[in-house]
Amino acid sequence: MTKIKHSPWLLLITIGLGTLLNPLNSSMISVALTQMQHDFALTFADASWLISIFYLASAAGQPVMGKLSDMFGAKRLFMTGLVLVVIACFLAPFSPNYGFLLGCRALQAIGSSTLFPSGMSMIRSHITEKQARAIAIISVFSSTSAAFGPAIGGFLIAEWDWPAIFMINVPIIIIAFVMAIFILPKASKVNIDLKRIDVTGILLFTVSILGLILFLLSLTEQIRWSALFICVIAGILFFLIEKRKHEPFIDVEALQRNKNVNLIYLIFILINAVYYNYFFGLPTLLQQVRGYSEEHTGLIMLALAGFSVFITPFVGRLIDRKGSKLSMIIGATLLLVGTGLLITYNDASPLLWLIFIMAILGISNGFNNISAQMALYEHVDKEKTGTASGLFQTSRYLGAILSGSFLGMAFSKHIDDAHFHMVIIVSFVVCIGIVGLTVKLPKKASQRV
């Protein structure tokens, strides 16, 4: 292990500047969809692909980047990721068509997906004291950038239109890249072993998820049964092939052995599906139905994301004292209550009522994020933390993908209070299921993988 030449704080700031790019760009887009719909003459279902493709690329990219980091060196991968993001951000504003813009979003997601696993690899290798505190600091970068993404995006779009949400990344990347050159620990020797990259598993996983998204988006029009067929076949092949792999993309055998881990992943997928229904659905409603500007919409959305950041330290202390299950039940219950209250919101409701409801939903998100992650770590061995964390992030992305697909169906023809209330009612039913599944979790780990 090489010794850090600079302060650990400089190392954390450098890594933090990189890791904030993925959550920042996943949240800023929420207030840009309306303008992009107008500029590219899209339906909401079409525009929702800007959400889905980002999370699809991230879901496939994050777990495998840890292996690439081991092969090529964490510093090299980190800097390569920054370069990919800056290329995507320079090209996106000049997109000649919607397909090109989707490609830029995919490249942006792949590039930013390299930054978290490579950054965590450097932290675990070069910061041996107070490592948990260091990881918590990186989490603050991620959660804060996600929280303020809609507000930042709203201001940028109000002043310079949607291309600004791409260009704002450039100064951050330049600073992070220069700091990375001088501050990040020297990269280890390249250890290329292409056999360690489970290309077949990655492709089958991506094809299966893509088939599912295409099927969901087609439900309001001519149903694409062929997409569902491809999803199922690719999923079955993925399961059978991954069971035989020495280093699989996803260890399906380990997942089979531990039902509690599977349950946590399922709960987290459903939680994020509901949360992102509001995170992406509310800005669209506020702009296209209520008539708010992008700038004002971004400020209103701070209530949803900001309270999530505010409550985080309290949740951490509660988990230390009482364990993860109580916090998970509180988070799931608050999500159910907030969703129920949101059913009462209509065009006659005062803005303060909406902000109050969003605060409850934001607090629930703060509980859910940390408690689900801690519950996961209670059921996996320490040496498998990296793999479990990668799948945990993939669960988040799958929830976001399901949300984007569902909103595309709900808002495909028309966006109004009736359609939004339909989204809320479906979410309320899902929330009841989340509470029930959370109660089933054991208080203590009885089995680990």
Image (tube, rainbow, N blue to C red):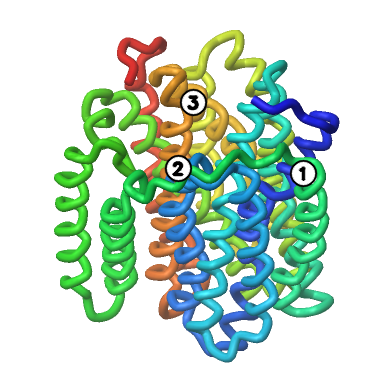
The circle on residue 202 is none
Dot 1 alpha-carbon crowd within 10 angstroms: few under 14, some 14 to 19, many 20 or more? many
Mark closer to the chain start, 3 or 1:
1
| Residue 319, quarter of picture | top right
Q: Is residue 313 visible?
A: no
In three-dimensional space, the C-alpha distance between marks 2 and 3, rounded to whole angstroms, equals 31 Å
Q: Position of residue 169 (x, y in %)?
A: 74, 63
In the rendered structure, which amino acid carries the disc numbered 2?
A: Lys
Q: Residue at horizontal 47%, vertical 31%?
A: 386
220 lies left or right of 364? left
Q: Residue at x 80, y 41 (%)?
A: 183
Vertical placement of 274 versus 33: above or below?
above
Q: Residue at x 46, y 39 (%)?
A: 390
- Placement of the C terminus among the 4 image quadrants: top left
Query: CA separation, marks 3 and 1?
Result: 32 Å
> To which residue does mark 2 refer?
67
Check residue 328 in the rendering and tell me which mark sits there, or answer none: 3
Does 153 appear above or below 305?
below
Which numbered disc, 1 or 2, marks the residue closer to the eye? Answer: 2
Image point 75% across, 71% down: which residue? 167
Callout in the foreground (2, 3) = 2
Callout 3 amino acid: Met
Residue furthest front as drawn: 189
In front of the other: 87 or 288: 87
- Position in image of residue 242 (x %, y %): 22, 43
Secondary structure under tag 3 reads helix
Q: 165 or 30: nearer the eye?
A: 165
